[in-house]
Image: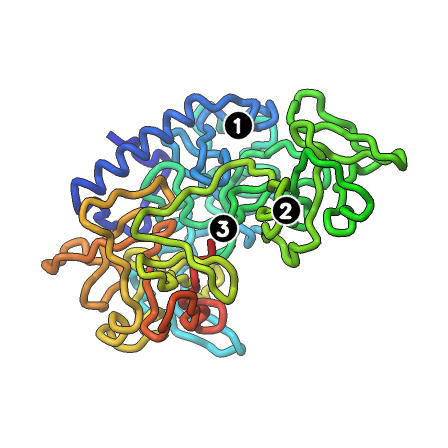
Amino acid sequence: MIASRSSLTVGIPYRWFLSEAIVMGKLVAGLSLLLAWCSISLAHAGGEPRPSNVGIAMTDEMGPLFVNEAGFTLYTSRYDDRANISKCNADRYERVLGRGQAVNILPDPETRPTCEQAWPPFRPASEDVTESVGHWRVITRHDGSVQWAYKGQPVYLSSYDQIPAQLTERGTFLGRTPLFVPRGLPVGMDGRLTSAGFTLTNTGGYTLYSTDEQCDRECEKVWRPFNVPVAVVLDKEDKRLSFAMRSDGSRQWAHEGNRLYTYAGDLAPGEVNGQDEEGWDPVILYPRQEPPEDITVQMSGDGEAFADRNGMTVYAFYCSDEAPDHLPCDRPGAPEAYRLSICGSPDVCMATWRPVVASSGAKQVGNVWTIVPVDPTGERLFAREDGDIEPLMVWAYHGRPVFTYAHDKVPGDIVGDKVSHLVDWGFWMLKR
């Protein structure tokens, strides 16, 4: 059986396993990720020590991350802006000061969980209560209880994660970020998820490419050498990276013996326009998870986008409420007022945002593409746990159901992108 979330209090209960296929898919994914947790060595964390109840699991696309003893993802929050102090507590909110300094009444405040119910503090095991381990430190919370902090950032679990190593939040919309294992990259290097996979970049997010060809002065007008800062000393334990000397005496980074460059044709961080140039390859740290057969990739006016079988762009509903703890309102059990304020009545909602139903016999793809039950009436985003109506089994991207938009007429249209209330909630296209 799948291990339970130790130290995790589920803030929004929900019956997730509606079909045997989903149960088995989650079982296989959970067991494989737990095996990965057991087998990945401490070297991934730069050899640093960690508490007894902290493990390491491999994600589908973004490399290793820290997990609890049951394999569930650990998170930090950008709202914790003071070292070793958690702002995520048991406060309850009914009225909030929204955008434009207007006082707003939160929908369903009586059922809204507290921050610490939604994001339970990750607590030390009993033998570690008084210890600090490497970058991990035991801190005291508002109520006198304790939790772990990593490098000064309080650490949490998510009540919304359903399977081990799931990434309900990926550090974008709600300000909660998975706690990834340090990648051990030298100064000036970073990594980023791109259409090609999790890619080696400079700290500005621009893709690094390698080549075994000679790049002369004319070539370097387009392909810019990625040089080594003067003070950097190479970590001899990393066999992939090395220095290559240039004619002017400077040093250039090389990966597996091939020199590294950025590409002038990449105009924004995360672009990989150079991957189609002969002789040049982006440096991929972890491959991209391929989508299921029901999901395709289509070129749009804003780059590559995920689409349905007919090439129509797919979207997901993202929502963060306006309370100080910014809880998600796009998860099972959340108020429907936010979504319905965007698309209207339930029947209009279903006619406008059309769920992408999984084909018969379809199986989830890792933790990225899963199948979730959606309410066919449109009254709710997710099907009721005790409902009598048979749910639609819909493809979900990182747990969020995906939809096509009625006003997109041809493949590549992205009319539905950012149909939203400012930036707090609405529908966004899923870019590859």
The residue mark sitting in front, 2 or 3, is 2
Q: Which mark is residue 176?
A: 3
The residue mark sitting in front, 3 or 1, is 3
- Residue 307 lies, with reference to residue 379, above or below; the image says above
Which residue corresponds to mark 2? 207
Which quadrant is home to the N terminus?
Answer: top left
Give residue 40's position: percent from left, percent from top: 47, 24
What type is the residue that disc 2 sits on?
Thr
Q: Residue at x 57, y 23 (%)?
A: 43
With 67 as the anchor, is 183 left or right in this view? Answer: right
What type is the residue that disc 3 sits on?
Arg
Q: In what element is the residue under mark 1?
A: loop
Quadrant housing residue 42: top right
Give residue 96's position: percent from left, percent from top: 45, 70
Q: In what element is the residue under mark 2?
A: loop
Q: Which mark is residue 204?
A: none
Can residue 348 be seen here? The reply is: yes
What type is the residue that disc 1 sits on?
Thr
Q: CA distance from mark 3 to mark 1?
A: 26 Å
Q: CA distance from mark 1 to mark 2?
A: 43 Å
Which residue corresponds to mark 1? 130
Give residue 100's position: percent from left, percent from top: 53, 78
Quadrant housing residue 227: top right
Q: Nearer the viewer, residue 311 or 164?
A: 311
Give residue 7's position: percent from left, percent from top: 37, 36
